[in-house]
Image: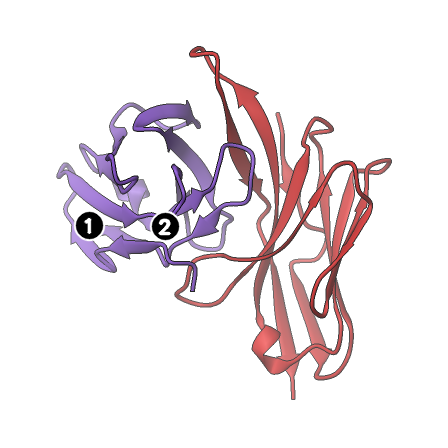
């Protein structure tokens, strides 16, 4: 186990709704990254938070946003959900910007 | 653009055999490579990593080889066990500068190789 936890485990939403996913980092880690993993694919980088600020972003639209809190936990928010947003959302924490990242179990989001 | 790909989408071996999973990458600027194991319903699990200034690194039953000349990465698993059955991903990590003057490490994953170990 990595010590990274995510909630909820599963979630079903309707197209157009908004969703918030949560992540608790491993103790001592100050970097949190979020990834989207479609079925049968590798994870795709969404963004990274470092010291409570977005520190880098992948090719995802602005309706994907996030927060990092002083205790380094993090949220991923997705507005105006689309069917293609159905995926496993993974959170990874790390001890710095250029080091290994440890993943949580993920949240399975289904958009109907 | 950058990409990381795998030569073999599936690999089936007998228990006790050695397994080799291959990966090709295209970004010569990547300075760090990681192998992850992902079991059904779980997040990717860190297996082993290697920096670009190395060509080999060994762990417990696993060895990663890096050939920068041909941009190739491989994971060798010795004495493969049924518990090794999973999807294996290689990922490359490189620091990207951002407008704020800092940098961030972004993992780029391949599609994965399904390893099945038969008892």
Q: Disc number at residue A76? A: none
Q: Are marks 2 and 1 on the same chain?
A: yes
- Chain A takes which shade in the image? purple
In x, y percent, where is residue B105? 53, 31
Q: Is residue A27 left or right of residue B104?
A: left
Q: Is residue A92 above or below residue B81?
A: above
Which sits in the foreground, B69 or A39? B69
Question: Which chain does the numbered disc 1 sit on?
Answer: A
Q: Which residue is mark 1?
A: A112
Query: Residue B2 occupies which quadrant of the picture?
Result: top right
Which sits in the foreground, A61 or A70? A70
Residue at screen point 74% across, 28% down: B28
Question: Which chain does the numbered disc 2 sit on?
Answer: A
In x, y percent, where is residue B34? 62, 48
Q: Which residue is mark 2?
A: A27
Q: Is residue A67 left or right of residue B35?
A: left
Q: How is the image coloured?
A: by chain
Q: Earlier in the sequence, mark 2 or mark 1?
A: 2
- Chain B takes which shade in the image? red
**Is label 2 or label 1 in front?**
2
């Amino acid at each position: 186990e990595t010590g990274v936890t995510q909630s909820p485990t599963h979630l079903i939403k309707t197209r157009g709704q908004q969703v918030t996913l949560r992540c608790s980092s491993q103790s001592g880690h100050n970097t949190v990254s979020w990834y989207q993993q479609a079925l049968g694919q590798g994870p795709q980088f969404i963004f990274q938070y470092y010291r409570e600020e977005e520190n880098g972003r992948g090719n995802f639209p602005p309706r994907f946003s996030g927060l990092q809190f002083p205790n380094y936990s993090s949220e991923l928010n997705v507005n105006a959900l689309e069917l293609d947003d159905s995926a496993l959302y993974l959170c990874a924490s790390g001890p710095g910007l250029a080091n290994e990242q440890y993943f949580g179990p993920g949240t399975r989001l289904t958009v109907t | 653009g950058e990409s990381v790909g795998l030569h073999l989408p599936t690999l089936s071996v007998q228990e006790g055999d050695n397994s080799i999973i291959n990966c090709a990458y295209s970004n010569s600027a990547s300075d760090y490579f990681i192998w992850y194991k992902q079991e059904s319903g779980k997040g990717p699990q860190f297996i082993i990593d290697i920096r670009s200034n190395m060509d080999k690194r060994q762990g417990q039953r696993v060895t990663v080889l890096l050939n920068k000349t041909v941009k190739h990465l491989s994971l060798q698993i010795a004495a493969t066990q049924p518990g090794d059955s999973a999807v294996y991903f290689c990922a490359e990590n490189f620091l990207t500068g951002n407008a704020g003057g800092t940098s961030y490490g972004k993992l780029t994953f391949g599609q994965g190789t399904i390893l099945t170990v038969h008892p």
